[in-house]
Image (cartoon, rainbow, N blue to C red):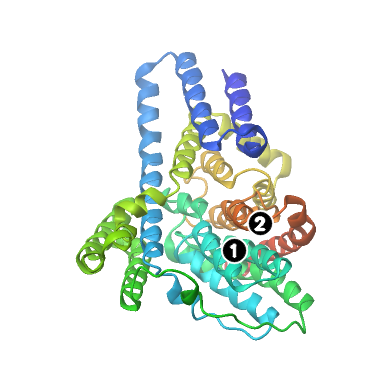
Amino acid sequence: MTAALIIVFILAYAAIALEEQIKINKAAAGLIGAGLLWIIYAMSVGNPELVDEELSHSLIETAQIAFFLMGAMTVVEVVDSHDGFEVITSRIKAKSLGAFVWMIGIVTFFLSAVLDNLTTTIVMVSLARKLLKDRNDFLLLAGTIVISANAGGAWSPMGDVTTTMLWIGGQVTTIPIITGVIIPSLINMIVPLTLISYSLRGRTFEMPGTVEGQRLQYTTKFERNLMFFLGLAVLISVPIFKSVTHLPPFLGILFGLGLLWAVGDIVVRPRKEGEARHHVTIANALTRIDMAAVVFFVGILLAVATLQHAGILATLATWLDVTFGRLDIIVIIIGLVSAIVDNVPMVAAAMGMYSIEAHPTDSFLWEFLAYCAGTGGSILIIGSAAGVAAMGIAKIDFFWYVRKFSLLALIGYIAGALAYIGQYSLLH
């Protein structure tokens, strides 16, 4: 049984990593892998009651993450459909290209912590495409956005799906993950941006006309401000909801989505007609969320759960401990591997390999894992959802990114990792 489970999982993993080459969506590969793994496990164990209990437990954990992601994605799409992000993007001003890179990087870093790194990348790359006419400058900024978005998402429960998984799973809590990882994440961004801005010294930059004047507006300034700040409040309040009520985060995000939905129907929608009325509906926002990504998370989490119940992940954790002997090196390797393959299954596997009993909530392992898995994906353009999104929008060539940004991202990754290790040693 063990050999069959490992072979099927490796094949499913390879199909996910080679999504572009084999032309099969990674969500399909994840679902097929999960189905085959559970079939093999159930037939090998021969105890339907035990398998049913284990599957039900795994499904509850997986469903909480899926519902949370769907709620958060919908909130973001609602804000975007009301042009709410122009509240921030319309205020970005700069006179030199180096200063513009810093401004975009800083906005991306903090915005991705509140929204998520994927959505922030889409918003900021779309903005950069409208503000920069020179393609080389645009590509340079797009690469900067990928690094900044992944760094910003690592230290926030809302910013990266891997940190969200650790947060919902109880491995990290809100305040410790923010205070523990924000400085290493900042260093992860600052080091590459410093090198990039140094290479751009002396380059002037003239801001074009406002983005608002370049696109059809469906909402008024009041409506944009209302939906942006209300959506922001919904996202920020979820950790508070969890800590006060001790209810799971998915219920908080769905509750907030309901409030946002009601305000849109009462305040905004009655003022619209025709296309504008349809554009601002929640129903329209629901059609724009990336359901394929949610389905992929469901498939890969259920697949990894099989390996956990079969005891394979525990065996792997023991082997890593014996081979490398140092937890920090093991986590750094996990982060580097996440540049090649998706960081979601890497973190899901780590969560199954190590128990909370052995590594309590907010311990070194979980915080350092959030940093490494969240930022390691920046080393290659395919290593994170943010990178893949930027690759599609900006038409970034894989090898161009390797030449221009991989070394910068690796330097930032190592600098941030060393900063976290040093910080942890000082504080503990």
Q: Amino acid at mark 2?
A: Ser
Q: Where does residue 115 sit, x and y in percent of width and height?
A: 45, 63
The residue at the point 67 percent across, 67 percent down is 138
Mark 1 lies on a secondary structure that is helix
- From where the camera sits, is residue 336 visible? yes
Most foreground residue, 370 or 252: 252
Most foreground residue, 113 or 60: 113
Q: Which of the image's four quarters has the N terminus?
A: top right
Q: In the figure, is residue 366 to the left or right of 191? A: left
CA distance for labels 2 and 1: 9 Å
Disc 1 residue crowd, few under 14, some 14–19, many 20+, Cα 10 Å: many
**Residue highlighted by disc 2:** 378
Does the residue at mark 2 contact the one at mark 1 (Cβ under 8 Å)?
Answer: yes
Most foreground residue, 230 or 21: 21
- Name the outermost residue toward the front: 274
Q: In the figure, is residue 415 to the left or right of 167? A: right
The residue at the point 56 percent across, 41 percent down is 345
Counting residues from the N terminus, which is met first, the one under dot 2 or under dot 1?
1
Q: Amino acid at mark 1?
A: Ala
Mark 2 lies on a secondary structure that is helix
> In the rendering, which numbered label is found on residue 151?
1
Label total for image: 2
